[in-house]
Image (cartoon, rainbow, N blue to C red):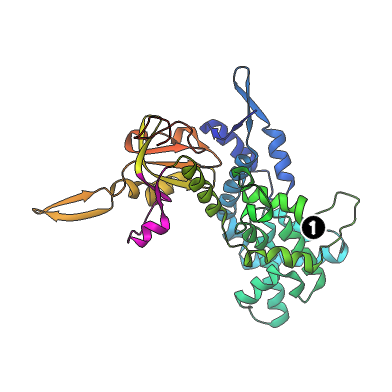
Amino acid sequence: WAQKMKLSRTEYRTIAKFTEQLRPTRQCMKMLKDRFPNTTLIPLFKLHHSQSTLLSIFSLEYQKRMKRSLVRHHAPDVIEDYYQRYRSEAKKRPSDPVLLELANEVDLSPSLMARLLVERFLEEQQGSVSSKQVLNGMLREPSLIPDMQLAKHVEQCTINDCCYGPLVDCIKHIAPHSLGFPLRVHHASPLGLLLALHHDIIGLALVPAAGHHYNAPTSHSFQGTVCVDKEFNSAIGQEHEEILREKLRERNLSFLDENHLRAKGYDKTPDIILEVPIAVEGHIVHWIESKASFGDEQSHRTYLNEQFWSYWNSLQAFECFRLRVLICRFGPGLVIYWYGFIAELDCQRDRGILLKDCFPSDIVTLCHGSGEC
């Protein structure tokens, strides 16, 4: 089956609507896959929805949801209600993941809920608001929390949240190949990598099924997990940029990356400038931008306004005979959304912005057509 990375606006909205009922737990992956296993829009040819695409869409939509509701959750009376409800339930059911259940009930990220209640707990214990450094340290290493029961529940929230929290922040800074994964795009999804770590590498105990007792992971195992970013500092975005560079080297295409361009004094730069332009699907490409995410309407509009158009037409200006003249730095280019994008957004080709969901295979060079130079 082919991987379906590019979606119509209708397909995207259907998936986004479905994610409204999901919470950022490992179960959301199975629910997404079960609900959107494949489509048969093309007769006799099945297109399988990419797991990374589905998870990237969920992550985008969930973060939008959290941003819309954060003010409500941060109201002092609401925090106090959460804290008292948590304390009451923790006394009644000390072995259950009550903090995680509360977060899911009120539709707040488990890690964000843990942050609110740890901050409230420290305020109660110390009589004042703790510094961010102290709070972040306890969230990264729950064994530092003086209350062992709260520490266990915070740990449960952290390892069951695939969108926020110290574990996710850490994983975003892990290079997949440094964990033994091949250097391939579908392994580089932060959410997919998180789940791979849960199931295949870390071996942490997650929320148990009904009737099963919860075994809290040791502080040693959790500490080794959340501190791994001290050893691996390559971000997921950088991993995709490296994939892009490898693809260009395979085609013997000369290029300059961001480091070269900034050394030359440029501020806003694409990830790649081609020293010799290429043609892709009949369009000239001078630069390539790598995006390790799904291209939805909101993020793409932001990228267009803050990045892509500046690469194309708004860079140098000087006075010539009292006329202000704009000099284009880079010209038309290509944006790769590695986890797919809404197909209708690829509507700026005539204006110099081409969208793809993978490295193009039909490159035409100035040397020998589509062959190597």
Magenta stretch: includes residue 325: no
Q: Residue 34's x, y, as percent?
A: 72, 34
Q: Residue 371's x, y, as percent?
A: 43, 31
Up/down of 220 relative to 57, above or below = below
Q: Amino acid at mark 1?
A: Leu
**Residue at (64%, 61%) from the top-left corner?**
170
Up/down of 81 relative to 69, above or below = below
Q: Quadrant of the N terminus?
A: top right
User: Quick one: 304 or 76, which is closer to the camera?
Assistant: 304
**Residue at (28%, 53%) from the top-left corner?**
315
The residue carrying pointer 1 sits among few (fewer than 14), some (14 to 19) or many (20 or more) residues within 10 Å by Cα, namely some
Query: Number of numbered discs present?
Result: 1
Indicate left or right for 298 with 93 as reference: left
Magenta stretch: includes residue 265: yes
Question: In which quadrant of the rendered view does residue 70 lie?
Answer: bottom right
Q: Residue 249's x, y, as percent?
A: 47, 45
**Residue at (59%, 44%) from the top-left corner?**
185
Q: Quadrant of the C terminus?
A: top left
Q: Residue 292's x, y, as percent?
A: 54, 48
Q: Is residue 122 visible?
A: yes
Question: In which quadrant of the rendered view does residue 286 lie?
Answer: top left
Up/down of 55 relative to 136, above or below = above
Query: As drawn, which residue projects farthest toward the top?
Result: 43
Q: Which residues are magenta?
A: 253-275
Indicate left or right for 77 with 11 as reference: right
**Residue at (64%, 71%) from the top-left corner?**
136
User: Quick one: 370 or 185, which is closer to the camera?
Assistant: 370
Q: Is residue 25 visible?
A: no
Q: Secondary structure at mark 1?
A: loop
Residue under pointer 1:
204
Up/down of 268 relative to 300, above or below = below
